[in-house]
Image (cartoon, rainbow, N blue to C red):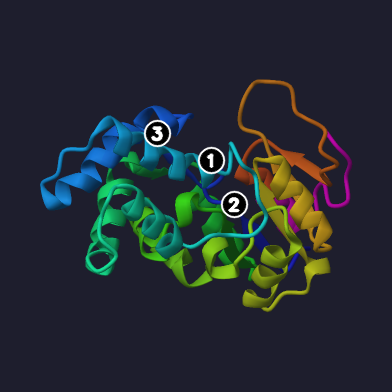
Amino acid sequence: MFEGVGFDLGETLVEYEGVPLDCQCEYPRALAAVASLWGGRLTAAQIAAGSAVLRRHNTRLVPRRHEVDGETVFGELLAALGVPATDAPALLDPAVDAFFGVFQRRARAFPDVGVALAALAAAGASVGVLTDVPYGMPRRLVLRDLSVAGLDALAPWTLTSVDIGVRKPDAAGFEALARRQCCPASAMVFVGNERKDVLGAKAAGITAALLWRGDSPVPSWDQDLTVTSLEQVVSAVVHGDGEGGGHD
């Protein structure tokens, strides 16, 4: 039996309604929301400058392992939009809220999450979350998503890439999660839906479970086990089903 379980957040525990796969198309609208804070109308040059900042910090376009916090990202963004340095500090938090308000949609827990978390708690397994965030999203907005999804109980056990300072698949985040859960890495399984979840968990000495909810062929990313539902995760943790198994 595993003593602890770590989870990725997005598309593992929580799904987001109406969030575009490519957020670049929403840049002009998000920048306009930020500019509305001071009643401004952005020029084409300002939109281009702001979009350049966002593309530079878009980890799907420019992958990185080190994390950049929101203060840095939005400080650069406000400067690109022509906000004087003396005015930027007071606008920082409102700009963050205005920007992410364009992208954040209703967060919903997948139907199998509640039952699985209850079963893991009943079995005495520790549970935590490690999630990468976009554009240095502050922790308070991640916790808001957890609350909207009805997962407030996970808040104290949730670590973000900003908290750690690195992004997956860097092993440091997974090691920090194991410490947070007071669980030896060798007695822990991490469940995620991306290659970086598998690579990072294995680099930290944690059993890597790939959660594959879709109908497409399951990729082979050297995961230790593949599951198609959180019910199978519970079986692996409580009964040892699939523990040490190969790829499915």
Mark 2 Cα shell of 10 Å, populated few (<14), some (14-19), many (≥20): many
Amino acid marked by disc 2: Asp
Q: CA distance from mark 1 to mark 2?
A: 8 Å
Mark with earlier residue (2, 3): 2
Magenta part, dominant SS: loop
The residue lying at 84 percent from left, 47 percent from top is: 224
Residue 12, by quadrant, is: top right
The residue lying at 58 percent from left, 38 percent from top is: 60
Q: Where's the C terminus, which quadrant?
A: top right
Which structural element holds mark 1? loop
In front: mark 2 or mark 3?
A: 3
Q: Is residue 17 visible?
A: no
Q: CA distance from mark 1 to mark 3?
A: 12 Å
Q: Which residue is mark 2?
A: 8
Q: Is residue 4 above or below residue 213?
A: below
Viewer-side residue, 240 vs 188: 188
Mark 3 Cα shell of 10 Å, populated few (<14), some (14-19), many (≥20): some
Q: Which residue is mark 1?
A: 11
Q: Which residue is mark 3?
A: 19
Residue bounds of the magenta highlight: 234-248
In the image, is residue 239 part of the stretch drawn in magenta? Answer: yes
In front: mark 1 or mark 3?
A: 3
